[in-house]
Structures are given as structure tokens and as C-alpha cells.
Amino acid sequence: GNFKGMGDWDEAVVVGVKPGGLYVLDYTDEGLIEEDVPASRIMRQGGAGAADVAEALAGEAPVTFAEGEAVLGNFKGMGDWDEAVVVGVKPGGLYVLDYTDEGLIEEDVPASRIMRQGGAGAADVAEALAAAPA
């Protein structure tokens, strides 16, 4: 990914897909997460762009989470991903998260602000990329 559009391309993992053709990238070597990254700033290793990612993920079932699942949550959409536990599943694809380290409960969290710990969500994206035409 081209972090913050600064022209320096670094290895990253797509860990989230957001509405409007935006992505969440994890720059694992730098320990950074970047949100709302447009496809124009993503390139598959080997040269294919993020348009392929979108095509590969088109028609995929929405990501869902189970009560009791350990996740990372983006509290109030502020961009800081913290460890949390799903303590409730609500209608409309919304969740209740318990940020145990912070002692906070957040209600009505959309799936777009939740990702699996340990890159499991990213593995799903990688699998979709592998199936995409080059």
C-alpha cells in the first residue's frame, strides 16, 4: 500500500473492506493500521490493483461475528483498533463489544468496525485474491 499517499509503497495486508470502495490495511512490518484507503493506493504484490480485490469480493456474504468471539474493534470509528469481545449480536448486523482492557462497552457497532484477531479476516481476503483473475 501507499501509506497516506506519500509515495512509499510498503507491504500490507487488507484486513477490512468498507463501503464505497475503501479498505483497511495492516502494514505489519511497521505496526500501523490505515483506514479508508482508496483502491488507487493499493497494488497486489506482482502488480494487480485493488480493483481485482473488489471484483474478487463482489457477491461475498457479509462478515459476521459470534457472541463470545475475541475481535479487534474500532471504538467509535476513531481509527484505534483495540482488543474486544463480542458480547451481543443485534438485528441489522450490529454488535455489542466489550473492550475489556479499557472497561468500555460499545453498542450498535457495525461489522465494518470489527475485524478478527490474528489476521483471520485478512486470510479471507487473501483467499478471495488468490481466486481472482490476475
Image (tube, rainbow, N blue to C red):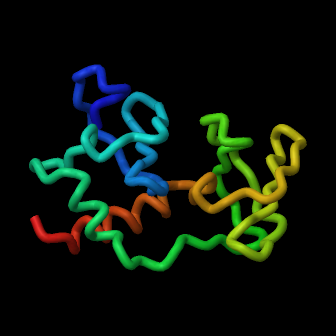
Judge whether 107 appears above or below 104 on screen: below
The picture places residue 63, in percent across and down from the top left corner, at 54, 71
What residue lies at 46% left-to-right and 41% top-to-bottom?
36
**In the image as oriented, which residue stretches furthest toward the top?**
6
Most extreme residue toward the front, as rendered?
A: 20
Describe residue 89's horizontal placement relative to residue 115 as left or right: right
Looking at the rendered image, the quarter that the C terminus falls into is: bottom left
User: What residue is rendered at 26% in x and 65% in y?
Assistant: 129
Q: Is residue 67 above or below residue 109?
A: below
**Residue 102 % position (x, y):** 84, 38
Question: Residue shown at 31%/62% (left/top)?
Answer: 54
Q: How many marks?
A: 0
| 36 left or right of 96 in image | left
Q: Residue at x 22, y 22 (%)?
A: 7
As drawn, 8 above or below 82? above
Q: Nearer the viewer, residue 33 or 17?
A: 17
Q: Nearer the viewer, residue 57 or 85?
A: 57
Q: Position of residue 86 (x, y in %)?
A: 76, 63
Across and down, in percent, residue 112 comes to: 58, 57
Task: Name which quarter of the figure residue 80 lies in.
Answer: top right
Quarter containing the N terminus: top left
Q: Is residue 76 above or below residue 119?
A: above
